[in-house]
Amino acid sequence: MTSPSLTAPHPMLTPEGKPSITDWTLTPTKIHLNHGSYGSVPRIAQQHQLELKARMDENPCIWFMGQAAAVGAARVGIAEFLKVDADDLALVHNASAGVSTVYNSLSFAPGAEIVTSSHAYGAVLEGARRVARRCGGSVRIADVPLNADAEAVCELVMAEANDRTALIVLDQITSATARSFPVEAIAAAAKARGIPLLVDGAHAPGVLEFPVPEFDGYWVGNLHKAACAPRGTAALVARGAFKEVLDPLIDSWGFPHSFPESFDHVGTQDITSWLAAGTSFEAIERRYGWDGFRSYSAELADYGQALIGAAFTAATGEDATADVGMPVGPLRLIRLPRGLATTHEDSHAIRAWISDELDIETAITTFDGEGFLRISAHLYNSPSDYEEFAEKAVPQLAHLARTR
């Protein structure tokens, strides 16, 4: 199913001329359009991690006695990938762990407030509410329209700040709405007010050439999404005086040290994912180039969004366009037929139905009472993946909406 107005990019091939998906181990009977949630690890990095696990169990004493040094070395490599100073970066197991670290390290005065937005990730928002309950404060949520531009977002967020604001927490790339936020401008505005900023950059590594904005504050990012590191690999970056207050969530033998060395001591946790992360980064650079990934995935996401959106519009008579204000790289949003995925529970049920009945992995999200399809694009995807969704899934979803 193609349209004369749409130009499909040529599918990405390996240097050997094979389909790029052969560098991954994804189930061949499924169409995988949800890299943005859980990522996928290249074969070569999977193999490296298995070798590391075997080495760990060959002699646990030697492995764990040398683990802090190994983490420190991995931290340097990951900092190079993120283009930040290794002294400003600690490794954590996911972005939520990094956010929780900041929440638990800062001191919140009685009645303190945390400002975030209506696009905040659910777990991050719930963590902010927990902090607020603990200090008798509150969470102020800036209601940011889906199509808000950078200036409007900055104004709406900063309008919620006041003398009681102890922290601003914002997404760099939103999960439910697949859009970016002007975090640099908000960082400058927050600095002028003396308010620390925590940026949830869960989706930024790999998607952005420079994923960590230049500001004094906190940034967390997952490396298992676009960057394809083994899951359980994430970074917490802290700059300026703000990093001096950070302590690991779990007390271990790093207590004599300060950030980030204090985070290198993680007891008997399995940190093979951290040690194998560089293998993914290097393999993608060597075989495709990170610039190649970014250009291909953006072009493919544009194609998929236009094709599937047009199919939904033709099937329902409703405009499936979703103006996200500040679109980003390999993630795109498409409005679902009216009545579908209007709650989080329904969005999960529809996603599971699409997977079970149609053999397509997707992300179905809900924002402001409306349901959306969030598609991802990565090197292993090809135009045929989105064409098959348009042919196979769109009619079924349109029918589902009519019969509810």
Image (cartoon, rainbow, N blue to C red):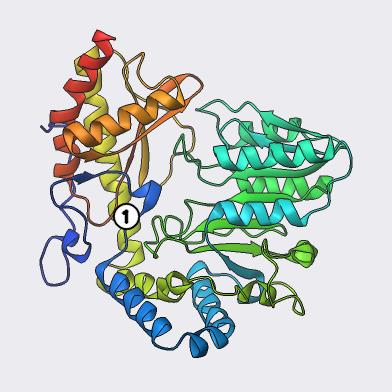
Residue in the picture at 39% in, 65% down: 230
Q: In this image, 82 relative to 251: left or right?
A: left
Q: How far across and how far down the image is residue 29, in percent?
A: 13, 47
Q: In this image, 320 relative to 272: left or right?
A: left
Q: Which of 143 and 258 is in front in this view?
A: 258
Residue in the picture at 35% in, 70% down: 280
Q: In this image, 148 relative to 127: left or right?
A: left
Dot 1: few (<14), some (14–19), or many (≥20) neighbours within 10 Å?
A: some
Q: How far across and how far down the image is residue 126, in percent?
A: 63, 38
Residue found at the far top of this picture: 403
Q: Look at the image and tell me in which quarter the C terminus lies.
A: top left
Q: Nearer the viewer, residue 399 or 5?
A: 399
**Can residue 334 be seen in this snapshot?**
no
**What residue is pinned by disc 1?**
295
Residue in the picture at 19% in, 28% down: 393
Q: Label 1 is placed on what type of residue?
A: Ser
Q: How many labels does the image show?
A: 1
**Residue 35 to residue 136: above or below:** below
**Residue 307 to residue 252: above or below:** above
